[in-house]
Amino acid sequence: MSDAGLRETVRALIEDEARLLDDQDFEAWLALFTADCRYWVPVSREQATPGDGVAHFNDDKQLMAARAHRLLNPRAFGAEPSPRTAHVVSGVRIDAVDDDGTVHASSSQIILEYRRRDRFEEDSRVFGGRVRHVLRATGGGLRIAVKRVDLVNAEGSMNALAAPF
Amino acid sequence: MVGGMATLLNSPPTFDPAALVRPGLVHRSVYTDAEIFRLEMERIFSRAWIYLAHESEMPAAGDYVRRHLGTQQVILTRDRDGAVHAIPNRCSHRGATLCAFDRGSAPGGHSCPYHGWNFAADGRLRGVPQRSNYEGVLELGDYDLQPVRVAAYRGFLFGTLDAEAVPLVEFLGHMATSIDDLVDRSPSGEVVCSPHVLRHHYRGNWKLSFENLNDTIHPGFAHSASVVSAKAVAAGLEEGEPLAASLGMMLANGKPIQFFQDLDMVTTPRGHSYIGGHMGANYTADTQSAYAQALIAHHGPDKAARVLGTDRHLMLLYPSSTWHARYQTVRIVRPVRHDLTEIIGYTFRLPGAPEETYRNAVEYCTGANSAASPVIADDLEVYERIMDGNGFDAREWVPLSRGLREDRETVAGFTRSPATSEAFIRNQFAAWADYMGSDA
């Protein structure tokens, strides 16, 4: 694939992923990830690996599936009504391609989140930062092996987070 | 009427806060009233020993951390002789805070950004620029920052604003054994605080968190949705595919209530408590054996067996912190306003232990302290609903009488109750009324 073609494929994948989250189509969202994937939102840009320390999210696919199940479960009062999100994806870049075809990509993302709790302007929140994807070539095309979200306020204090970024 | 106004501002409160606590009942205003919160800062958070930091967070001379005693900011700095001092984070000139970072190094002392007044680790005012302007007017010694009383227990540093406070070990009492439990788990005798810290907050009173953590009845209800989700995922696993530890933690909340009824809850004077049984994942066999060998080498077989056999869930050290020795996690409960609380989670490495022990600590703290944890998100939602609901309706008294007649035993220094009891909340309010009831 040409450089431009690969970039276009990767950009489409990252945008599709964000769109599936906004559409709350979690089943299709999970299907974009490899079985051994990691969804990781560290508390610091200094963290090199999830083993370095605590994180906001440090999910394997099972935990991602449990979150997805919960977001669709009306008994999960802590996530009901489910938050609605709008992802803005920009500046998709390919940072490196390994010999085996694994792609390291990054993008800038802003996530607007709304959950109606009758707290007026506090019901809307804005998150954002650098998102890194490690995409592995599989028989079914590129799949997400790692999604790392470095929030601009990674070290900050968070109130309840129900929706993945 | 100017005189009248001054009298009003200085007059003591016309109510007795201790009267807000009755046997098995508490008045809802203890959660919702900003004036009561102000009194708590004065009478509880200025008197109790408050957990601040661990020695390992300031390894070198000049290293500092910024922490809170209630709503007051303090800076803890290690001096050239190795001693740690705490001083108010407030310039004695115009009152600006000196230090804007949670941690750092200030080998040259703390300088005010406004006019450059410079303070030593112990609060001594070392220098004032343009000193000639103050010639015969201002004595530097009069503007030293007053050090905050600090004491350490096995490397954990506590502070109090009360010069009359009982010694730290007396304040800790039997709960010192839970701190021992954490430190004794290290095969080198050292524990090292990780620089990676997990913070969350909620729009609710600080006490709600203390009253939730050892409440073993709420998980079956408040966290039932995450149990359902974890079960749904577990049911879909392939043959032989292991369940993730994080899901195991979620499933633990689905244990039958009898399990908790059979466990002990221990309450001690000054509002502290813990419950037996860590309810979590066991180490893998390899870790267990390597870790046990390392502990035996350090402690000898008898003590090592005792350390590994100790099984406690959260220890609540009222009013500042919650401790999980088995997972090397300490959380600071930081009251910000009557309706705003921050929880700050710290994890500790045990040098000499297999890496898996730290991984378990990280996994536990992430599951128990991330705002994104499905379990925590449910708790935060409940705290905020409690704040909402206690703001209206005629019913003013909150019952805290679960298990009131079920205490099992009271011996010197502590009481045992079933872990399903609200005894730990009643115990917290007994301490609360003690602190709040006197203005001396």
Image (cartoon, rainbow, N blue to C red):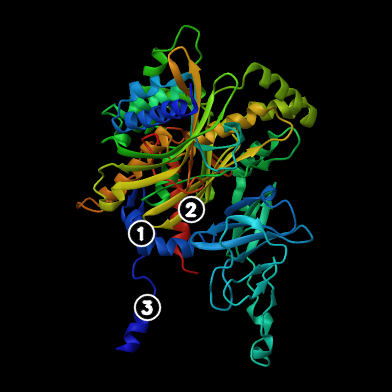
> Could you say which quadrant of the image residue A25 lies in?
top left
Tag count in the figure? Answer: 3
Alpha carbons under labels 1 and 3: distance apart: 22 Å
Front in this rendered view, residue A103 or A163: A103
Q: Residue at x 42, y 64 (%)?
A: B39
Q: Chain of mark 2?
A: B
- Kindly give the residue lying farthest to the left in the view shown: B394
Query: Do the residues indicated by labels 1 and 3 lie within the same chain of the protein?
Result: yes
Position of A71 relative to B192 (above/below): above
Tell me the tag on residue B9.
Answer: 3
Residue farthest bottom in this picture: B136
Where residue B241 appears, as percent x and y from the top left, is: 50, 11
> In this image, B388 relative to B309: left or right?
left
Residue B192 x, y percent position in the rendering? 68, 42
Tell me the SS state at disc 2: strand
Say which residue label 1 marks.
Answer: B19
Q: Gap in Å between the C-alphas at discs 1 and 2?
A: 25 Å
Chain bearing mark 1 = B
Residue located at (29% from left, 89% from top): B1
Judged left or right of residue B62, residue B37 is left
Asked if disc 1 and disc 3 are in contact, CB closer than 8 Å, the reply is no
The amino acid at mark 3 is Leu
Mark 1 or 3: in front is 3
Across and down, in percent, residue B55 comes to 69, 50
Asked if residue A117 can be seen in this view, the reply is yes
**What distance separates the C-alpha of mark 3 from that of mark 2?**
27 Å
Mark in the foreground, 1 or 2: 2
Q: Position of residue B439 (x, y in %)?
A: 46, 68
Q: Earlier in the sequence, mark 1 or mark 2?
A: 1
Mark 1 and mark 3 lie on one chain; the one further toward the N terminus is 3
